[in-house]
Image (cartoon, rainbow, N blue to C red):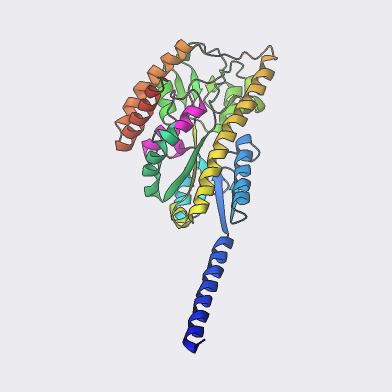
Amino acid sequence: MTMPNITRRIAVAAVTLGVAFATQAALAAKYEWTFQTSETAGEPQFEIKKAWAENVETMSEGRIEIEILPTGAVVPSDQTLDAVSSGILQGHLTDPSYFTGLNPAFGMIGNLVGAWSDPMDFLEYMKEGGGEEIYNKLVEPYGVHLIGAAVTGLESLPSKRPIRKVSDLEGLKIRAPQGMVYNVFERAGATPVNLPGSEVYTSLQKGVIDAADYTVFATNQSQGLHEFAPYPNYPGFHSLPMVAVSLNKEIWDGLPDDLKAILKTSVDAMAYEMAFKLKERDLKAVKKARENPDVHVIDMADEERAKFRQIAQKEWKAWAKKNDLCQQIYDTAVGFLKDRHLM
């Protein structure tokens, strides 16, 4: 064998070995991220989100480690978008409605009040109805990328007085955050009161409010709200908030394709787990509540639910005029509901 051939083979082997080492180094690369949620530590949704992070670490064979922090741990809940964009946080799992002040489209897609009667319908809309694409048009200019959407389930409505008909909302002092849900209840004749979630318990206790748009039945039950608001509606008829699982866009763009696939698959799995587990908790809590003669669980009739949705649709149309993305959300969501005979 001539010297040039030996030199050439040594060079090829060196390049091959270098590529192998580079590949091995890439596979061993560690991504350590901090995500903030919109729940306090210990809440069922918080625990589900922690389990998601553990699943990502397992699926990625340790290449991704995610620390899940409760609401307010780093920044207030309405500032996580800026924190993820700037790199203070690497991601968040939160309701987009918190960012309605930046763009009303966040509030519209985050909780299209009265639209969804089943979490699976909303998840299908996000996956197959254009929701994810529209959300990324909305959020990527802020330097954030949506990995995928999850959902909490239909929220209950604890109330001091029975709400069997839409007309029962007339004059009802109801806690509601600013945004579409506030406007819809106002349009339905209620008197919305903008209070933080942390004040719901004491406000019901002291009679500051008559009812609360707050969270799912089981959480209301565990927090003792039914002691002061013994006429809860279940299943709910108004609110089904989105959970946006998002990552800093620069980080997302720099990830290898296999890790992107792992993240997307893991979020899909968490979305179903969250919907099913929260529903299971609700059913158990409803059964327990019905054993209490002082609590009266109300299931609003279908014709009354339809009346509420008709009121909500007027608000959807009003919001659709706010900008192009709002109009896209309106067109795709209404089209999806009509195609599936859900509206």
**Residue 76 visible in image:** no
Q: Is residue 79 above or below residue 88?
A: above
In the displayed structure image, the side of residue 180 where residue 282 appears, left or right: right
**Residue 159 location, x and y as percent?**
56, 18
Magenta residues span 95-124
In the displayed image of the protein, which residue is found farthest to the bottom?
3
Camera-side residue of 237 and 334:
334
Residue 119 shown in magenta: yes
Exactly how many numbered labels are in the figure? 0
Q: Determine the residue positioned at 59% across, 41% down.
A: 49
| Residue 134 magenta | no
Classify 238 as above or below 324.
above
Residue farthest along the front direction in this orientation: 1
- Picture coordinates of residue 117, whole percent (x, y): 49, 22
Q: Nearer the viewer, residue 93 or 64?
A: 64
Q: Nearer the viewer, residue 263 or 77?
A: 263
In the image, what residue occupies the spot 57% across and 65% down? 24
Q: What percent of the width, then of the height, locates residue 317?
A: 32, 25
Q: Eyeballing the image, is 43 above or below 249?
A: above
Q: Quadrant of the C terminus?
A: top left
Q: Is residue 48 visible?
A: yes
Residue 304: image x %, image y %? 46, 12
